[in-house]
Image: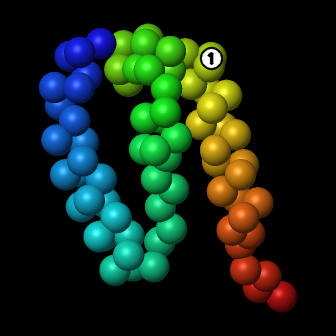
């Protein structure tokens, strides 16, 4: 899984560009980088991209936690 870490700077740059784009358009971005960094790559991913069941659970719960803390505005 060291192969994944080799591209970390590319991922960081892409995430920075995405966040800048989203901020300009007032689009929320859920950054789960810290959540994933607390675990080993091998624990969460099969190959650095595709999630294992543990990764599915972790990031799904991260989304639920974010959504509950940031409910969409009522439009009615």
Q: Position of residue 73 (x, y in %)?
A: 73, 80
Position of residue 24 relative to residue 5, above or below, is: below
Residue labelled with disc 1: 53
Query: As drawn, is 41 to the left or to the right of 68?
Result: left
Whether residue 50 appears in this view of the structure is: no
**Nearest the eye: 21 or 35:** 35
Query: As drawn, is 12 to the left or to the right of 36?
Result: left
Query: As drawn, is 13 to the left or to the right of 53?
Result: left
Q: Position of residue 67 (x, y in %)?
A: 70, 58
* Residue sitting at the far bottom: 76
Query: As drawn, is 34 to the left or to the right of 10?
Result: right
**Nearest the eye: 73 or 40:** 40
Local packing at callout 1 (Cα closer than 10 Å; few below 14, some 14-19, many 20+) is few
Identify the residue shown where x is 26% and y is 59%. 16
Q: How is the image coloured?
A: rainbow
Q: Position of residue 51 (x, y in %)?
A: 50, 21
Q: Quadrant of the C terminus?
A: bottom right
Position of residue 17 relative to residue 44, above or below, is: below
Whether residue 35 appears in this view of the structure is: yes
Q: Which structural element holds mark 1?
A: helix
* Residue sitting at the far front: 38
Q: Position of residue 38 (x, y in %)?
A: 49, 33
Position of residue 6 relative to residue 46, above or below, is: below
Identify the residue shown where x is 67% and y is 28%. 57
Q: Quadrant of residue 60?
A: top right
Identify the residue shown where x is 62% and y is 19%. 54
């Amino acid at each position: 899984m060291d192969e994944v870490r080799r591209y970390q700077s590319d991922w960081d740059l892409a995430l920075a560009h995405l966040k800048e784009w989203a901020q300009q358009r007032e689009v929320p971005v859920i950054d789960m980088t810290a959540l994933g960094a607390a675990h080993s790559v091998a624990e969460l991913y099969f190959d650095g991209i595709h999630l294992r069941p543990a990764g599915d659970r972790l990031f799904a719960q991260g989304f639920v936690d974010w959504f509950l803390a940031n409910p969409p505005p009522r439009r009615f």
